[in-house]
Amino acid sequence: MLPENNLPILIGIDPIRDSVIADAFTDQLTPQENLARLSKYFYIKAFFSEPVFIKDKGDVIIHLFHLFFISTMGSLCYANRSNARKGFVFHFYNRIKRLEFINKEPTSLEFKSYEHFKKKFDLRFITEDAIKDLWNSKSSQHGGKYNKGDFKSIGKVGKGLMRRFLNNFVNIHEPKKEYPYSKEYPYSKSNAWSDQEVWVYSERYHTHHHSGRDITISHQSNAPHIFYSSEFQNCGNGTYGILANEKTYLWLEDD
């Protein structure tokens, strides 16, 4: 969980920020990943227990951060500009006493064109016809066209599950179907459709924490995309979407 903060009083600004705030109170992402995600929408003022050295600022007890991000090596980093491409490793997470989140002026979340929207997707996981259908439809959550804020990061646990899924997945057009079920051919034939042959392959993670999430990634051979769900422990309620690529999914609904 994040250190003491003012996030609860910021709920209600808009649906996208509300979703990001709600996720910060689960273990779907690590605290560091949540800071990186939250910094897209909020400036983050950190109050430290002792002076820390911030590049170009020197030793500080309080500092306003414009951007956090996770490096390719998995480290939490900070930058002094919201649009920065490089930054510095943040070594002081355990010295944070309190965080104050300050709303950034909304930036445009709309896609400039269909081609920009399409680039969010890996065509192993979805057909181009399905992408076009999404482009021409509206979100059931906010009623507008799908935008950049509807694409959510897959957390640490989800990424581990993704690696397992990819061990036995080629693309949506090539299910590894063979009878009987085996580790090499993990698809099973479904009896739910009497008029067609449907093969299903799912990987699941079951949390052992009350506040955790049960995560499922599933391929159904008669669907034009891969399903992704993150549900509360032992409960049929949660967040549902479809894979966009190995790191993100498109948020379709909360139940």
Image: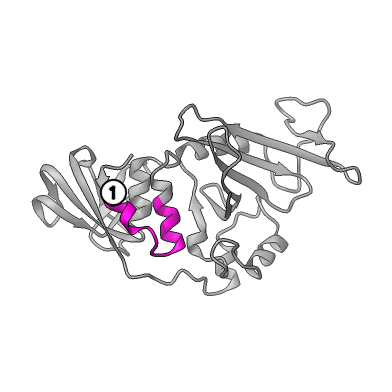
Estimate the x, y position of residue 26 in percent, counting from the top left: 42, 41
Q: Main secondary structure of the magenta part?
A: helix
Estimate the x, y position of residue 61 in percent, counting from the top left: 10, 49
- The residue that appears at 48% across and 36% down in the rendered structure is 157
Q: Is residue 141 visible?
A: yes
The residue wearing badge 1 is 77
Q: Which residues are magenta?
A: 6-21
Is residue 171 found inside the magenta-colored segment of the image?
A: no
As drawn, which residue projects farthest toward the bottom? 112
Q: Is residue 195 left or right of residue 200?
A: right
Q: Nearer the viewer, residue 91 or 250?
A: 250
Q: Is residue 45 left or right of residue 152?
A: left
- The residue that appears at 58% across and 36% down in the rendered structure is 235
- The residue that appears at 63% across and 34% down in the rendered structure is 203
In the depicted structure, whether residue 114 falls above or below residue 187: below
For mark 1, does the 10 Å Cα neighbourhood hold few (<14), some (14 to 19), or many (20 or more) residues? some
Q: Is residue 71 visible?
A: no
- The residue that appears at 32% across and 64% down in the rendered structure is 83
| Quarter holding residue 187 | top right
| Quarter holding residue 192 | top right
Q: Nearer the viewer, residue 54 or 141?
A: 141
Q: Nearer the viewer, residue 130 or 169?
A: 130
